[in-house]
Image (tube, rainbow, N blue to C red):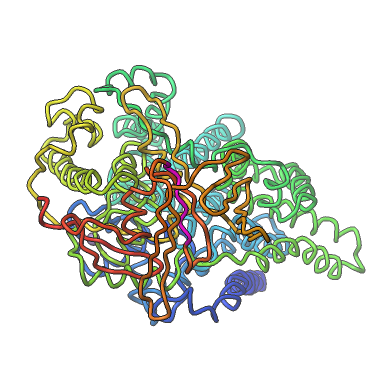
Amino acid sequence: MSKESKTTLLYISIAFLFSFLVRFIWFFQFNGVEDLKFNDTLMLTTNDAYYWAEGARDFLNGFHQENDLSPIYHAPSIIIAIFAKILPISLEATFLFLPAFLSSLIVVPIILIAKNLKNLEMGFIAALLASIGVSYYNRTMLGYLDTDMLNILFPLLLLWSVIYAIRTNENRYLLILAIEIIAYRWWYPQSYSLEFSFFALIVFYTLVFDRKNIYNFKLLSIVLLAMMGAHEIVRVIIVSGLYYVFTKERYNRYIYKIFALSIVAFLVFGGLNPIIAQLKGYVFRDELLKSDEGMGLHFFSVMQTVKEAKQIPFDIFATRISGHPVTFSFAFLGYLYLLYRHRIMLFSLPIVGLGFLAYSGGLRFTMYAVPILAFGMAFLISEFSKLLPRLRVFALISLSALALYPNLEHIYNYRVPTVFNKNEVDILDKLKSIADREDYVIGWWDYGYPLRYYSDVKTLVDGGKHSGAVNYPVSYILTKPQELSAKMARLDVEQTERAFKLREEDDNITLFSNIEELTKEYGFSDTNDFLASLADIKLPQKTRDIYFYLPHRMLEIYPTVEKFSNIDLMSAEMSKPSLFYLAPSFKQLEDNTIELGHGVSFKNDTIDLQGKNYPLRRIVQVGYDKELKFLKHIDELDSTSSISIIYLSSYNSFLVLDESVYNSLYVKLLLLDEYDRDLFEEVISTPQAKVFKLCQKIE
Ligand code: MN
């Protein structure tokens, strides 16, 4: 092995270990917290992780339920399952640690790219910086089991092989690049735009600088065939065959014909479909809406509650990419200088461009810019240290440490807990032994993936399925009175399964939202008429059991949950939100007034809402004693009023609410224990959450 190869290997090993071990800072901060563990292992740190956990579990078991939305055959599930199989650790431990392992692999292409630029030191520094850059770390920390684990590795591998292909013209990079593209798309279907940008840059390079070189046409042909819309296996076979042809010089005279054929194949096999779909979305928007109109129901949009897709301040943008606005500025200058000195690095523009899109398009893209700006910073450091020949090593080390510092500081302070705690998960685990895999558990979408992972049941909504149309019935069920909720639950579950079946039987069937289909099914043309008749309608045949998961933590988002069904679907008019105020803290004054913050206070039987006094209908105290026995005390006051107060003694907090919230399924079943025994049966009850089952009687 050459000295250069040895150094390369050494740098890769050190950088990999660094990246891997830094991710254990979080582990040591939290490993003592039993509340965040399940089966003695720290739980996961992002909601979406439970989606892949479900897929991996099902893949390992070799089965899942029809229409349970498990991503059993998706690439991440399969890769995770393979690691779980070969690693001598538990499935849960694999989920926890795998992100640290896979995400640290980015140091390999980074150092190899630098090796090609004859600047291994720069590669080493860039690898350290990139692997722990703020936004990359945030999305690849322990327990962050998501596509992000490899979503930076793949673009860097593409960059590495494009650079090597163009600089060496060696045949093997043709095959390597093609396989990377196929693997990248398999892992992350949204990778198309980045692949296509690389292709466009190679076209540009070929036309402007290197038109006579037939290697470039080989490269373009194989990239096109790797990108076209056909099954992965088909594409692997095609590009392998083509690679074989390309290695035989006697076929060189056919290269332009092959190139032309590749373009045709690319077009015929839907290579441009993603672009056409995008364009349709923009250009023909009105038309699409019209043809899909149906009854034209208006649902509350999730975009109105998700804050991610907003412009972000420059400070946050810079910090997420390079740890600090100052380091970002140096890194950016260094990147420009790097582009000037090493033109080949212009091929990194698509990646950094995607990262900079974050500036207007949402935080999660910033991580794409992390490794490329890390190159910029590392190049600046290595060039600067050359100016100080005697202090070179000292300059390299101290400047690198300075650049690393804000990122490490962030990691040390980024103490995010796991998304669920032990008590909640114990409930879900218990539910697994009660509910059948074909049963539905109704809960807000935040609990969809974890419900499916821990309880292995079906859900109506989850982290990926939560449009206004699917949220509407779930919101309705949670926030309306029990009898209506029970009916809606049965209707929505049966209609959901029915819609799956109908779609299986007929690919081209047009099905609108469940609520619209139900409205028509029951012979109405106005959804409000259908809803008004809900109490009297005959329910469909029961095919499975239905459970309700009601966690205490949903109290904080109750007003958001309510919004989705607090809308007139026909006219798009939002009703006035219910009175719902969960006091963050309270203070008792000497005259017995209890102040609840935000201008809300009450004394005896009167409540003061921001300066206006109202009589109270009742004051309720609920809680659990030391044996976890439920206790309730109600003071009935003015029955003409609609405002009540509930004191939650176990949580030491006050809730101010009106009659519509008071009578909602969520409050009656979870907080007040006043449920209709003919409709619901309690199956799990803890202070953190309760689970109810829909009774047979109303079928
Ligand atoms: Mn399942």
Quadrant holding the N terminus: bottom right
Q: Left or right: where does residue 527 sit relative to residue 583?
A: left
Asked where in the image residue 429 lies, by quadrant, the reply is: bottom left
Name the spot of residue 200 as percent of width and height, x first: 51, 34
Q: Is residue 248 visible?
A: no
Total numbered badges shown on the rendered structure: 0
Q: Residue at x 16, y 35 (%)?
A: 507
Name the spot of residue 539 as percent of width and height, x first: 11, 43
- Is residue 299 part of the magenta span, yes or no? no
Of 629 and 699, which appears nearest the observer?
A: 629
Of 440 and 523, which appears nearest the observer?
A: 523
Q: Residue at x 10, y 55 (%)?
A: 697
Q: Left or right: where does residue 565 sit relative to residue 109?
A: left
Q: Residue at x 80, y 58 (%)?
A: 381
Q: Which quadrant of the picture is home to ligand 1?
A: bottom left
Of 548 and 388, which appears nearest the observer?
A: 548
Of 543 and 315, which appears nearest the observer?
A: 543
Up-down: is 259 above or below 410? above
Would you say the magenta stretch is mainly helix, strand or loop? strand
What segment carries the magenta color? 641-647
Asked where in the image residue 357 lies, by quadrant, the reply is: top right
Up-down: is 103 above or below 559? below
